[in-house]
Amino acid sequence: MAERFPSSEPVSGDSRQGDYRHSRVVGASVPRREDPRLLAGRGRFVDDIALPGMLHAQFVRSSEAFAEIVSVDLSEVRAVPGVVAAYAAADLDLRDITALLDRPAHEFVPTAMPVLARDTVRYVGEPIAIVVATDPYAAEDGVEAAVVEYAPREPVVSDLGALAEGAPLVHPEAPRNTLVDVSLFATEGIDALFEAAHTVVEVHTKTGRQNALPLETRGVVADWDDRDEQLRVQTCTQVPHQVRTVLAACVGLAEKQVRVTVPDMGGGFGQKCVVGREEIVAAAAALRLRRPVKWIEDRRDALTAAFLAREQRYAVRAAFSETGEILALDADVVCDMGAYSCYPFTAGIEPLMASAEMPSVYTVPAYRVRGRAVTTNKAPTAPYRGVSRPQYVMVMERVMEKAARALGLDPLEVRRRNLITVFPYTGVNAITYDPGSYRESLDLCEQTLRDEGWFDRRSDGVIGIGFACFSERTGYGSGAFAQRRMQVVPGFDLSEIRMDLDGTVSVTTGTLSHGQSHETTMAQIVADRLGIPYDRVKIVQGDTDRITYGWGSFASRSITIGGSAVAAASVKLGDQLREIAAHLLGGDPAAAVLEDGGVRLEDGRLSFPEIADVAYLRSHLLPKGVGPGLAATASFDVAGDGTFSNATHGVVVELDPGTGGVEILRYVCVEDCGVAIHPQVVEGQARGGIAQGIAGALFEVVRYDDAGQPLAPSFMEYKVPTAAEIPDVRIEHLETPCAFTENGAKGAGEGGTIGAPAAVLNAINDALRHTGVELDDTPIPREAIFRALEAS
Amino acid sequence: MIQLVELSVNGERHDLAIEPRRTLVDVLRHDLRLTGTHVGCEHGICGACTVLVDGQPARACLLFAAQVEGADIRTVESLSEGGALNDLQQCFSEHHGLQCGFCTPGMLMLAEGYLADEPDATKEEIREVVASNLCRCTGYQTIVEAIDDCASRRRAALQDRLDRSAS
């Protein structure tokens, strides 16, 4: 095993100090630069933007799950007072959005997503026409006046229904409603391993469809600017450059004729990391009308017609030796991706993730998987925090629990016998895992709950304890995405840094903070590289005119890849500063030290403003070969398979036999994301992620009736947990620095969400162990708990 | 139809000519340009639009502006004076009680209204009140801690004043 660094003292939530190696401000929970404006109500979210003459848009949406559109009559709409324009697909003539994988036809069927539905609607809520009016109320009046005639067809409302013989086809080009169908790995001799195994356990699980649910719904303000000859689009997206590319193609503009900027954003969690149809249509309307157009999604549309996620079905077998070593894993994964492939990830996002990474933190010697994406008449799917990992981790943790029961072993002992402990480890899935603290995090999590006395309180039917061990691949470079064979391959990040006359620094990042605190954490990284206070560093993000190219923020890539690019650019700028200072003072640049806002050499010191003064105002004094100005550009990519954060979650639940209700009494998270740039932010990511994982385990689900009508169109039906349901979380940190990110940091954005469903499910099953009932689906039905307890 | 409505917001009087169906939150945000108050659901569940109406937390998405004529309305913009954050806002920052910041104005106004009525609230009571509003980022723990910390500091400051006036 690679050398483990000693863990720092756990940093509590209110600490402002950290004790990290080789750094000054990295590792310290400094005050967030985002906070003052957000706390004063002076942030600028998309709906806060008002432009002169701005119009307001809403959408006529399909009331049918699957139908041919016979006619769309907008004449009454246009007569509504305040309505300025109404456009259906034929009025705007926009190019379709198509996301592609470079895979053969038997593995991937490309399907186009029209920006407005043309002849066919494929889910309730699909946009058919845009109504633009002088105020939002009039726009809604206009929507109500639309007359759409449908010829309904029998909808496909479940994954099994989609795969059934003779099922209606959501897209005629996709037989069996299958968009992605990959069979991977198939280790030679795997069937013989199953036949010879002492024990084979099976897990069959179905996970509910969920909404990532940023509290700020989607929205956009678009206007055409004659002076810049640009369509300016202010939109809440995690991926501004990808929006620019798709928008330019859809409306027929050059990329430079589109400027996408991102204001403050009220969360995204993946739902905003794909290109939305409505933002394209609203921009097209602004282009047509030559007036600013704003669209703000209302909550009903956000719950029913926005991108959803997580509806998956697993049929898994695992072979074990008598002593609890896993010998083989065979999995069939079906993901219900809804009506369309999302851009840029495609409908492969969930099945390809699950198929590639399912062996999780265990040494699985033989593996075979079939992963499928099926299309149904439901709102389409986008990545959602964790992407398949909450599901396959749940499956693997159930595998370990079931094996332990079948073999009469302690479930934590079974995990210990199978955890990866020698790094780097290259798995049967051809992924190389960099060093982590898989075993140590489990040991510490168990010990913490033991020390707190919870193991003494376990009791049949009342109190159960559950665990989840997992890792989280973060920092997916272009290599990792290329393996997925996306035609558009995300991965690298670019950073451009500049020092101004007064010694302040601005630095671009292609990533995009929407709650993750990059204005603070990226500034910390720069500050340490240059020896300046972090509040002298301004982060520039979310602007396609000011940033050459970026992939935005998703897949916990921002600090690992974006932070590394920012660090690399800072180092280059620092080299320039040292070279100029050494020339001016006389001395060796290699001996020059950046500190306290200047450069120190043996024979003196120059402050950054003094160096900038020469670089900009007296450039004739610069050394030969050094051009004027202080600026540098750097890029970063991860060459290998990314870096893996890891954690163990331990949960104590109490069941209510009278109602089947679940109360979480204790939640312990032992996490390792390498060097934490800002421990308080890392803890915030973990706690918020855990809340979303608990939401998926116990509360949230998007259901449809047989006609494909969504059954949770408001917060009355879609139960988002509150402070009454989400417990406090004790967090302990381990630190295994990443060897190849510039900061030793690993991603920390998704782990909380990944571990929580498995840990909660295992805890409930632990409390039910005397009943013989095992619950494997999420959200866990309260009724099933009640019945299990009643029967016992 | 247009109606004349007179509103008192953050101590300032505003005369508005608006449609009677216009909600308080839309008037605050779009007519008065006080965009600190947010809209999260428009059906009274998420609480992002929470403001104080005569000192009581209220869902501004469920009120018509015309309903609150004559009332004293307070929004998040009233909390910081001269650009300086108040004690509650500072506690939110210190405890990392906000990430994206979208629910934050509603949480702040909820807490201000509650602590004004119940300065001795326990942490568990505060947790119950925080359960009125939704946050998707924090998992709530740090919001509860921030409000609890602020309440403690306010109690200590009050005790300090009482002690000094007694001596």
Image (cartoon, helix red, strand yellow):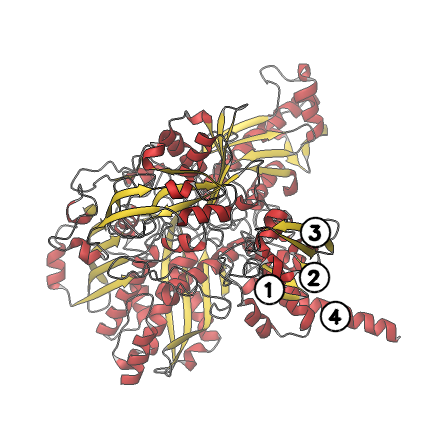
In the rendered image, which residue does mark 2 sit on?
B70
Per the image, the residue denoted by label 3 is B14
Q: CA distance from mark 2 to mark 3?
A: 11 Å
Q: Position of residue A338 (x, y in %)?
A: 28, 51
Is the residue marked by circle 3 packed among few (<14), some (14-19), or many (20+) residues within 10 Å? few
User: Helix, strand, or loop for circle 4?
Assistant: helix
The percent position of residue A367, horizontal first and vertical second, equals 20, 53
Q: CA distance from mark 3 to mark 4?
A: 38 Å
Mark 3 vs 4, N-terminal side: 3
Is residue A297 placed above or below A243 in the rendered structure? below
| Amino acid type, callout 4 | Ala
Chain bearing tag 2 is B
Q: Amino acid at mark 3?
A: His
Q: Tell me where residue A411 appears, x and y as whole percent.
A: 31, 70
Residue type indicated by callout 2: Gly
State which quarter of the image contains the C terminus of chain A: bottom left
| Callout 1: chain | B
Between the C-alphas of marks 2 and 1, the distance is: 15 Å
**Is tag 2's residue or tag 3's residue first in the polypeptide sequence?**
3
What is the quadrant of residue A119 in the picture?
top left
Q: Which is more toward the observer, A16 or B34?
A: B34
